[in-house]
Amino acid sequence: MTIPQLEKKAKEIRLTIVKMVGPGKQGHFGGSCSIADVVAALYFYKMRHDPKNPKWPDRDRLIFSKGHAAIAQYAALGMCGYFPEKELWNLKELGSMLQGHPYLHKTPGIEANTGSLGQGLSMSCGIAAGLKIDKNRAPRVYCIVGDGELAEGQIWEAAMSASFYKLDNLTTILDYNKLQATGRIDERLNTNPVREKWEAFGWHTIEINGHDMNEIVESLDSAEKVKGKPSIIIAHTIKGKGIPFAENNAAFHNGVMTQEQYETALKILSEQGAM
Amino acid sequence: MRMQNQRRVYGETLVELGRENKNIVVLDADLSKSTMSCLFEQEFPERFFEMGIAEANMISFAVGLSLTGKIAFANSFAVFSTGRPFDQIRQGVAIGKMNVKIIGSSAGLSDFGDGATHQSVEDIAIMRAIPNMTVISPCDAIETKKVVRFAAEYNGPVYIRVSRNDVPDIFPEDARFVIGKPVVLREGKDITVFATGTMVYEALIAADRLSGLGISVRVVNVSTLKPLDEESIIRLSEDVKGIITVEEHSIIGGLASAVTYALRGKGIPIKTIGINDEFGQSANTYDELLVHYGLTADNIIENAKALY
């Protein structure tokens, strides 16, 4: 897929997010929209995966350690055809296959149960280590973490274990949008500086603009070539990217759109040629 | 009477399983020489993961390994393997019914010298409260071996409680372990003692001595604390004058809670022997602690007399 095509996919993901949540309902717009470009690049460019065979042993895996941004993953999975598109419109309804946070046994394409922050990276390390035991199999593991999530001590336990076990089949992407649920990360509990921390923990680091598809694609390609250590792509992003009233607005971490805002978001994303 | 070390037999069983099944993987948090997972490390270094002193990461990492088809045994002392990573067990292991086995080693008061911080009085309660979790407290080394084998074959979360010390053999080598089934070790018609783990042996001693006093005691080993076979518990309680539960654990949330709940509304007199909602403490010997907390055959005898 070309860069413009991937950019279009990212816009489609954002439009789908807006439609899935709809007006008057709470949804994690902010952190889902900030990572939408990376998600588009993973599902439509980088990852080897087969929507018709979600448990294909040689598939690459994507784990949202920041599980609250699941709607970005659901949108992409729906677009890929992991489940019928109509399932997207049952988000968080009783009995729905799309739970508020990723649920392994309910949703085709979901790899792990995440949502309690800090755990998805450890699980990703375990998956990467498990795949390395079976030496004939070399799928790649991708894990998306949030910058607020970096306050969880377990992230750093996982970071140590990943470099100790030389998990070079693991690429982590940091959704570095600088906001957490209650405000700016540097004013709440500062997790900065991030790059220095990951380097000190033995990781290969790459810093990019997380909304520039060229940079995303290049960084995913170059991370794959690093041997002997795990990689982290520090993606500078804007929380709520693509929905003007949600951009850089912590209130839309888990916010509610009015009917008017909903229509504005649909109009803007549609004009950008999402669908 | 042969004494065997429960944790050593646990470690040896892991090695046997490792030889039989290449999908067995083992994790430890810097206590492998105590939990005896070091035996597995020596033979299968490529399938052993030292996680450092980081129990939360150990459990979630084990979840990841299980997601690649591995059968993961995560080891630490019972206080640390259940308490520190409670959330990791709940969210990562239990909700998704992952194939992760959590080992609570040096359980109960068995780490007698280290005091309250290292003695687990509530691990069974914590694990029982989690949906999808199977909770087993084997009574001797032979049953431990069978339980570990069961855990490897069963596809889902299991918590196994292992004592630090030597324990007398109760079962013959060829005994079968059936998940969920309380085992009547000795028949009796006056009192039923339900015991779990290390307390099963104390119950047998008490029953012996009580028979000399003319009190006939049935002793039941309840190694599977969850799922609890309520039907058997009721059946083995309705034909006696009263029942006693005995456990090296708090009376809150463990065997006492499980059995009294099973017998709700039956009007059967019940005595519960366990740790009475308090923490442990250091002592020079394990036996000193057992006496201090009333976890002895003597105390079972006193309670049986009161019920008779």
Image (tube, coloured by chain):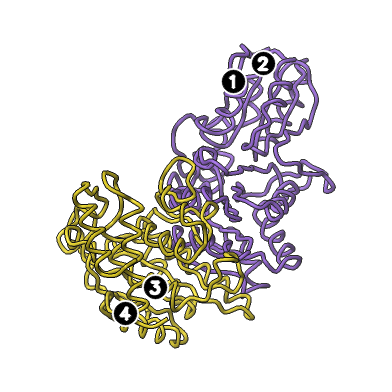
How many numbered discs sit on the rendered protein? 4
The local crowd at label 3, few if under 14, some if 14 to 19, many if 20 or more residues have their Cα within 10 Å, is many
Q: CA distance from mark 3 to mark 1?
A: 55 Å
In the picture, residue A59 is in which quadrant?
bottom right
Question: In this view of the protein, which residue sits in the foreground, B219 or A224?
Answer: A224
Q: CA distance from mark 1 to mark 2?
A: 8 Å
Residue ID at (57%, 24%) = B261
**Which element type, helix, strand or loop, lies under badge 2?**
strand
Q: Colour of chain B?
A: purple
Q: Amino acid at mark 4?
A: Met
Q: Which residue is mark 2?
A: B242
Q: Which residue is mark 4?
A: A213
The local crowd at label 1, few if under 14, some if 14 to 19, many if 20 or more residues have their Cα within 10 Å, is some
Asked whether the beta carbons under mark 3 and mark 2 sit within 8 Å of each other, the answer is: no
Mark 4 or 1: the one toward you = 4
Asked whether the beta carbons under mark 1 and mark 2 sit within 8 Å of each other, the answer is: yes
Residue ID at (20%, 64%) = A190
Given the image, what chain letter belongs to the residue carrying mark 4?
A
